[in-house]
Image (cartoon, grey):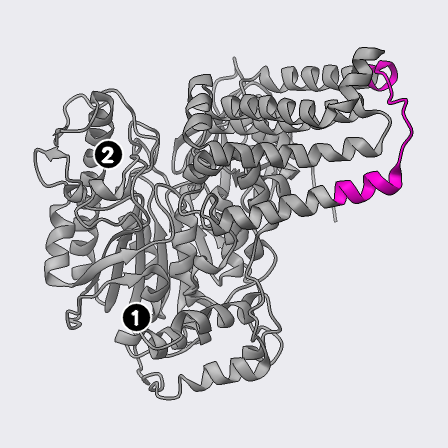
């Protein structure tokens, strides 16, 4: 009793020490290394102390209960579980566990199956059950605090502790111990600690209301655009194509690399002959969707929460003024193309809120034998998909294409048997292998650029083609490693087949759409007109923040109070998948050939409403086996998502087997139909 009494007297000190140990364990789990956690603790002691204080603050609630041991145990388990989730995710992806992940747990089981082995989910259930059992034991068996509960003292002290931690956070931000802008969310977690970054991505989202926000202020901003010309009246407008090239930039700007030959000769030649410059992007090493968001909407990510992905927050709830919406009002058809899964970055859910009429994802591409050593679909498949979009309509087209071939995580050992380009000069041999893999991938991407521009050169319609890299590759680059001494930029080029004047300048991702529209005489949309009229003027950024707030979070004074943009009923893919007939194969295994059109490796059969193991043969044939079909079985073919959810991407219309299967001796007779 004397020991417990003494422990109660110094419980705050013991709790602080326990929180430090707990936080060290959490970082060791997240970094998957005790050594890395120790290096972090000793190299960034103030950040380590801040996050320890964060955990300590969450522990203060124990002083409002007699079951202090139980409360401490629950909070400790909570933090450890969060660390384990993050550690497991980082073993399989580069993005850590964030606030949007917590908000999107509806597909939790499917996600767990993706990141854990087949038996992993069962083990997780067992472990969670044991944890709950242990907590019940602690609840009933752990000692209770026997002293008097001075709530009139404890409650104000706990509140004072929370308020003190808030003040500590503001001081840490002011002194730049912490940051409230994450250029690369993975790096931010490493620099500023898991608890702080996770909390920031949960609570600090969206755009805060500007201090001077009002209808008069929005009217003033709109009046500054009066000098802008009206949209040029033309019978025919050019097609507009954007190509977002995954992790694409000029590796010759890395000053320590020795590269055997130019990896981007075509892109470099295009930059010499067409409008080009540096392309300022909102992230480094990751964050494709954020560069994409800026390019499509004209909005700057600088005013959103740290590390926020609008695709995972506001755009899941509402529509947003964008280039597709604005151009649709001028008669354009709008298309998105991505040679990766449709649900990556929630694009299938978000693109209808950005005004896209169609979305052709990897699941709608034949892509036979068109993957790189890491399994990403090669960009060469995109040329055909772009031309298909152009050919699918009579009106002009806006096509936004997202490439994936240059995606990491790059291998730190040789995987290319006979690389076209060799690399040396990196600090380590493993880094040389990463760079060698990367430069050979972007060389193939450069070949895609050449093929696409050659194809479009002969296209019978006018085309403006914008190409750029979404961010630097994940190579731990520093400003000292780059000739231009800046991490947040790649390069862009604006190619065309009707001789637009060459105009070289550096642009931000949120400025490029307005610039392209300006060059072809289009001056529509609040955000795009704003960039055209106000770029490089006084208070440009201040007014941009106010305008963005009004369009997405405010009272929408720009629209008279109600946004005119309605969610689009977007079509997945350009061509319908049809089910035409069934042909019996071998009776030994009851195999059947499913005949139709526009099948891909993602096409899968549904038998009586249940998914059925399907073998992709070619674009007109699928194969199923193992079950004898009866006349009244219902069969359908649908495109199934390649993501962990494996959901159907669009509706399928089933048909009865008797309507598809030709006469055969091992088929049930078709019943007579009577009037």
571 with respect to 413 (left or right): right
Viewer-proximal residue, 82 or 364? Answer: 82
Q: Residue at x 64, y 22 (%)?
A: 18
- Kindly report the distance in space between the C-alpha atoms of the residues bearing marks 1 and 2: 31 Å
* Residue 571 visible at all: yes
Q: Is residue 287 magenta?
A: no
Quadrant in which the N terminus is drawn: top right
Numbered marks: total: 2
Q: Nearer the viewer, residue 671 or 60?
A: 60
User: Earlier along the polypeptide chain: callout 1 or callout 2?
Assistant: 2
* Label 2 sits on residue: 438
x and y, in percent, of residue 224 in the image? 41, 84
The residue identified by callout 1 is: 515
Where residue 365 sits: x, y (%)? 38, 42
Is 430 displayed left or right of 639 in the figure? left
Residue 141 magenta-highlighted: yes
Q: Main secondary structure of the magenta part?
A: helix
Residue at the spot 91% in from the left edge and 29% down from the top edge: 148
Residue visible at 29% across and 27% down? 373
Give the numbered dot on residue 478.
Answer: none
Q: Secondary structure at mark 1?
A: helix
Vertical relation: 285 (above or below) 321: above
Mark 1 crowd level (few <14, some 14–19, many ≥20, 10 Å Cα): some
180 relative to 502 in the view: left or right: right
The location of residue 494, given as percent across then percent down, is 22, 62
Q: Nearer the viewer, residue 155 or 210?
A: 155
Which residue appears at 42% of the width and 18% of the height? Answer: 35
Instruction: State the SS at label 2.
Output: helix
Is residue 569 depicted above or below 554 in this figure? Answer: above
For the magenta stretch, what is the residue range?
137-159
């Amino acid at each position: 009793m004397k020991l417990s009494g003494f422990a109660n007297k110094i419980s705050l000190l013991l709790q602080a020490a326990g929180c430090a140990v707990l936080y060290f364990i959490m970082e060791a789990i997240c970094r998957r290394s005790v050594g890395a956690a120790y290096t972090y603790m000793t190299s960034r002691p103030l950040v380590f102390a801040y996050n320890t204080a964060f955990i300590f603050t969450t522990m203060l609630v124990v002083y409002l209960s007699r079951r202090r041991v139980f409360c401490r145990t629950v909070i400790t388990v909570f933090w450890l579980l969060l660390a384990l989730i993050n550690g497991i995710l980082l073993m399989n992806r580069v993005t850590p566990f964030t606030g949007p992940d917590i908000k999107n747990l509806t597909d939790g089981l499917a996600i767990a199956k993706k990141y854990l082995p087949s038996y992993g989910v069962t083990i997780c259930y067992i472990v969670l059950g044991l944890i709950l059992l242990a907590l019940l034991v602690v609840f009933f068996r752990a000692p209770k605090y026997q002293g008097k509960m001075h709530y009139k003292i404890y409650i104000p002290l706990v509140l004072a502790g929370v308020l003190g931690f808030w003040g500590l956070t503001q001081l840490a931000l002011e002194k730049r111990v912490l940051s409230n802008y994450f250029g690369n969310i993975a790096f931010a977690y490493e620099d500023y600690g898991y608890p702080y970054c996770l909390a920031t991505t949960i609570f600090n989202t969206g755009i805060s209301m500007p201090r001077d926000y009002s209808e008069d202020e929005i009217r003033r901003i709109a009046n500054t655009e009066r000098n802008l010309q009206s949209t040029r009246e033309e019978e025919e407008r050019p097609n507009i194509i954007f190509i977002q090239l995954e992790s694409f930039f000029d590796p010759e700007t890395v000053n320590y690399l020795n590269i055997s030959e130019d990896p981007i000769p075509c892109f470099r030649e295009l930059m010499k002959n067409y409008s080009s410059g540096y392309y300022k992007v909102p992230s480094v090493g990751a964050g494709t969707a954020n560069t994409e968001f800026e390019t499509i909407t004209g909005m700057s990510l600088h005013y959103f929460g740290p590390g926020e992905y609008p695709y995972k927050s506001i755009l899941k709830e509402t529509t947003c003024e964008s280039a597709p919406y604005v151009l649709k009002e001028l008669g354009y058809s709008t298309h998105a193309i991505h040679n990766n899964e449709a649900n990556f970055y929630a694009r299938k859910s978000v693109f209808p809120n950005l005004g896209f009429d169609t979305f052709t994802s990897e699941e709608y591409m034949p892509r036979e034998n068109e993957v790189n050593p890491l399994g990403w679909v090669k960009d060469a498949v995109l040329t055909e998909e772009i031309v298909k979009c152009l050919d699918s309509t009579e009106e002009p087209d806006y096509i936004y294409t997202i490439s994936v071939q240059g995606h990491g995580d790059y291998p730190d050992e040789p995987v290319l048997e006979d690389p076209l380009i060799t690399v040396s000069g990196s600090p380590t041999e493993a880094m040389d292998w990463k760079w060698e893999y990367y430069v050979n991938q972007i060389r193939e991407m450069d070949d895609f650029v050449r093929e696409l521009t050659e194809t479009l050169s002969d296209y019978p319609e006018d085309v403006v083609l914008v190409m750029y890299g979404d961010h630097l590759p994940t190579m731990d680059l520093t400003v000292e490693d780059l000739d231009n001494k800046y991490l947040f930029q790649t390069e862009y080029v604006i190619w065309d087949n009707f001789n637009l004047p060459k105009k070289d300048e550096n642009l931000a991702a949120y400025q490029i759409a307005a610039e392209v529209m300006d060059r072809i005489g289009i001056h529509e949309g609040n955000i795009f007109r704003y960039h055209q009229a106000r770029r490089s003027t006084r208070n440009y950024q201040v007014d941009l923040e106010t305008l963005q707030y009004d369009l997405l979070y405010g009272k929408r004074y720009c629209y008279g109070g109600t946004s005119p943009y309605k969610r689009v009923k977007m079509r997945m893919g350009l061509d319908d998948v049809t089910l035409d007939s069934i042909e019996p194969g071998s009776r030994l295994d009851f195999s059947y050939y499913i005949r139709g059109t526009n099948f891909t490796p993602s096409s899968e059969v549904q038998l009586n409403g249940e998914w059925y193991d399907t073998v992709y043969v070619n674009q007109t044939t699928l194969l199923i086996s193992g079950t004898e079909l009866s006349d009244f079985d219902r069969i359908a073919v649908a495109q199934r998502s390649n993501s962990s959810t494996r959901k159907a991407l669009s509706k399928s219309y089933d048909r009865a087997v008797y309507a598809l299967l030709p006469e055969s001796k091992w088929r049930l007779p078709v019943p007579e139909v009577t009037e």
